[in-house]
């Protein structure tokens, strides 16, 4: 009996150890995974821990990318394939580590929104060496042959929409102070947004409708309709926000402090996205010498929609991530199914022309918030007050 008890105890301990090991292996750090049909996969579907589609997003600290995470999960829930989503938290080193993690899980397709376009080249080249098809998502990865496709909104059109909005709300006056701000110089989209804005603003700058307040580089180029990458870079070097609301706030405070009284009053402000727009708007709203401001935005973040309803932000460029995610996942599933994805154009990334699928954008302001964002089901009316 003593021997039987010893054997039973040993067996119980062994079973407990197995349980603990299996339980611990199910944890995941900074990742979210979707398995369709609760893991009952077949064909190229995941088995033995394999992931079909790996997705790398730049940060969890911006509402836009958290929304995208949810949309990706929704887009794949009825699919036969599996995916894992990892966040790079603003670090190119972490981004490369995330790609390596996904490659080790046997992915066939990598969808990546890079933190830094040029720096992401090494990560995607490693994926290409493993035979993985690479889709750049929303942000172009530059100076590499390591990407196959690009899914994006028309970034130049975004900037053009922002610039045109400022023109449409400027009236017939001359000498209107224009404050320029841009995204991060490490993000190719920031150049495209600014290029689009410059395309439509430049004639009004050249004819004196607008007077640039906060960029000597832009003033020096005010008579030039088309800017080179280097010229755009010089302007961005002076007005970049790095997509950081705190940096945007500090720059706006510095610019308003330095501006003469005649360069305040009724002003227009090119802000690159919603987070920076709210930060800049808060600064302009509290300056007693600014009587009125018109300010742009982008991404239709909930906080900015409330700002628009309250009259604190003038507009935002709505990029329906549901469509962008659907385009990206549709492209990935085509690849997994052995089909050639549909494209609508191409982008020069400095090394190759990358086939691209482009999605349209919509200008949202007070008068069409409800029709574009609530009636379409993107947000709920209860998300806002005063609508």
Image (cartoon, helix red, strand yellow):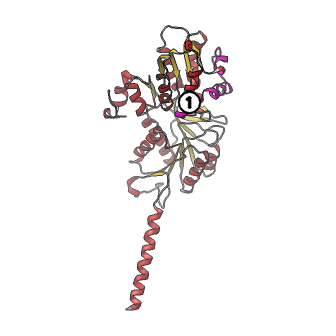
Query: For this rendering, which residue is in front, 365 or 77?
Result: 365
Q: How many tags in the picture? A: 1
Tell me which residue sits at (61%, 45%) in the image: 92
Is residue 318 shown in magenta? Answer: no
Query: For this rendering, which residue is in front, 150 or 298?
Result: 298
Query: In this rendering, does residue 144 appear at all?
Result: yes
Query: Residue 116's spot in the image, x, y percent?
Result: 60, 39
Q: How crowded is mark 1: few (under 14 residues within 10 Å), some or many (20 or more)?
A: some
Q: Mark 1 points at which residue?
A: 250
Query: Residue 289's spot in the image, x, y percent?
Result: 50, 16
Query: Residue 249's spot in the image, x, y percent?
Result: 53, 30
Tell me which residue sits at (49%, 7%) in the image: 172
Query: Would residue 137 appear left or right of 353 to someone viewing this image?
Result: left
Tell me which residue sits at (43%, 33%) in the image: 301
Query: For this rendering, which residue is in front, 278 or 121?
Result: 278
- The stretch in magenta equals 217-246
Q: Is mark 1 on a helix, strand or loop?
A: helix
Residue 214's image quarter? top right
- Residue occupying the far bottom of the picture: 1
Tell me which residue sits at (53%, 24%) in the image: 159
**Above or below 77: residue 200:** above
Instruction: Give the quadrant of the N terminus.
Output: bottom left
Query: For this rendering, which residue is in front, 322 or 366?
Result: 366
Residue 347's image quarter? top right
Query: Residue 340's spot in the image, x, y percent?
Result: 52, 41
Is residue 240 shown in magenta? Answer: yes
Query: Would residue 42 appear left or right of 147 to someone viewing this image?
Result: left
Query: In this rendering, does residue 200 appear at all?
Result: no
**Above or below 353: residue 363:** above
Instruction: Give the quadrant of the C terminus.
Output: top left
**Above or below 19: residue 129:** above
């Amino acid at each position: 009996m003593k021997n039987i008890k010893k054997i039973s105890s040993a067996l119980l301990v062994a079973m407990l150890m197995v349980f603990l090991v299996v339980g611990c292996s199910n944890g995941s750090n900074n990742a979210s995974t979707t398995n369709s049909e609760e893991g009952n996969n077949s064909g190229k579907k995941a088995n033995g821990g394999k992931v079909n589609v790996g997705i790398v997003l730049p940060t969890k600290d911006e509402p836009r990318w958290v929304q995208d995470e949810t949309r990706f999960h929704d887009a794949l829930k009825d699919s036969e394939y599996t995916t894992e989503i990892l966040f790079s938290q603003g670090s190119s080193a972490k981004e490369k580590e995330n790609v390596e993690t996904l490659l080790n899980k046997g992915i066939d397709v990598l969808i990546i929104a890079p933190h830094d376009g040029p720096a992401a080249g090494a990560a995607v080249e490693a994926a290409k060496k493993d035979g993985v098809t690479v889709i750049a998502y929303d942000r172009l990865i530059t100076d590499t042959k390591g990407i196959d496709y690009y899914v994006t909104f028309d970034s130049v059109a975004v900037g053009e929409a922002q610039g045109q909005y400022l023109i449409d709300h400027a009236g017939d006056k001359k000498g209107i102070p224009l404050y320029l701000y841009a995204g991060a110089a490490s993000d190719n989209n920031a150049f495209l947004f600014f290029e689009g804005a410059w395309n439509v603003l430049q004639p009004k700058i050249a004819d004196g409708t607008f007077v640039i307040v906060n960029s000597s580089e832009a003033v020096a180029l005010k008579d030039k309709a088309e800017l080179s990458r280097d010229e755009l870079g010089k302007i961005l070097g002076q007005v970049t926000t790095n997509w950081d609301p705190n940096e945007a706030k500090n720059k706006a405070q510095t610019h308003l402090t330095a501006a003469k009284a005649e360069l305040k009053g009724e002003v227009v402000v090119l802000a690159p996205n919603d987070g920076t727009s709210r930060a800049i708007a808060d600064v302009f709203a509290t300056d007693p010498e600014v009587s009125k401001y018109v300010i742009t935005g982008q991404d239709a973040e909930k906080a900015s929609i409330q700002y628009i309803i309250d009259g604190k932000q003038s507009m935002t460029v709505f990029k329906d991530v549901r469509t962008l995610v659907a385009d990206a996942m549709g492209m990935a599933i085509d690849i997994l199914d052995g089909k050639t994805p549909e494209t609508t154009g191409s982008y020069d990334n400095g090394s190759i022309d990358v086939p691209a699928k482009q999605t349209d954008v919509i200008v949202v302001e007070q008068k069409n918030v409800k029709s574009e964002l609530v009636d379409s089901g993107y947000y709920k009316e209860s998300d806002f007050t005063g609508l």
